[in-house]
Image (cartoon, helix red, strand yellow):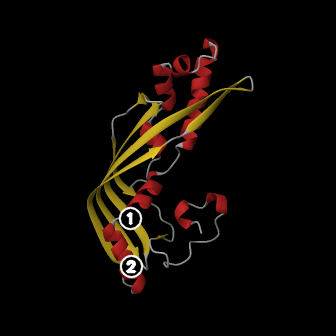
């Protein structure tokens, strides 16, 4: 079993895509050629940091709206102590992201690069456990993940979709699927709390 990858990992080496397409030369006319590679490497680093989003978060946010899971959440909330197993044969998810990177040279803003990332996931043979209105376990038999990277309509990268077998999504004490499923786990600094644990 493996942990979910990040959006950045699915997209692959961003710097290679920027170098290969000559991003700085084509989109940053105010930058001298001698620093093209440096600028592209730095832009790639910032992009990778912005896209360090676990697919586990994406999966939980999307799957929490699936009818079968929502129904199980209501039933187990109303009848505590009666967990339900929910099996999803196949489910597809698409998620857009729009990271932006400011490019500064000698302390001056040269440009703001606005990227588009399209994430496409196919979940196969997912097994979920719902208890007391919470998603308490999520295991995915096979996860097919692909992504594309574009800059103002110019496609920079579209790596082949990758297959991840036996993905286990860590859920801690569980993710509330209903408003009255109980408070989130405590003890984690607010800035580090995942979206589903925020109050």
Quadrant in which residue 109 is drawn: top right
Residue 86 in view of the camera: yes
130 shown above or below 161 = below
Find residue 118 and report its horizontal and vertical position in percent.
Answer: 41, 41
For mark 1, give the secondary structure: loop
In this rendering, is residue 142 above or below 116?
Answer: below
- Where does label 1 land, which residue? 65
Of residue 23 and residue 52, the one placed in the foreground of this image is: 23
Residue 23 rendering spot, x and y as whole percentages? 51, 22
Tag 2's secondary structure?
helix
Residue extending farthest left: 89
Residue at (35%, 67%) from the top-left corner?
Answer: 128
Residue 80 in view here: no
How many marks can you see? Answer: 2
Q: Which residue is mark 2?
A: 74
In the image, is 165 to the left or to the right of 15? left
């Amino acid at each position: 079993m493996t942990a979910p990858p990040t959006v950045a990992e699915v997209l692959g080496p961003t710097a290679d895509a920027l170098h290969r397409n000559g991003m700085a030369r084509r989109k940053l006319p105010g930058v001298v050629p001698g620093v093209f590679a440096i600028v592209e490497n730095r832009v790639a680093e910032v992009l990778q940091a912005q896209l360090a989003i676990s697919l586990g978060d994406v999966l939980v946010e999307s799957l929490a709206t699936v009818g079968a899971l929502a129904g199980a959440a209501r039933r187990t909330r109303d009848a505590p102590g009666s967990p339900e197993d929910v099996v999803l044969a196949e489910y597809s998810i698409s998620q857009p992201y729009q990271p932006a990177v400011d490019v500064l040279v000698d302390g001056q803003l040269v440009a703001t690069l606005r990227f588009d990332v399209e994430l496409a996931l196919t979940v196969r043979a997912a097994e979920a456990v719902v208890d007391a209105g919470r998603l308490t376990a999520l295991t995915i038999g096979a996860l097919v993940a692909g992504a594309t990277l574009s800059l103002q309509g110019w496609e920079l990268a579209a790596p082949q979709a990758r297959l991840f077998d036996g993905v286990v999504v860590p859920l801690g004490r569980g993710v509330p699927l209903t408003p009255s499923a109980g408070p989130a786990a405590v003890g984690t600094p607010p800035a580090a709390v995942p979206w589903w644990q925020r109050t």
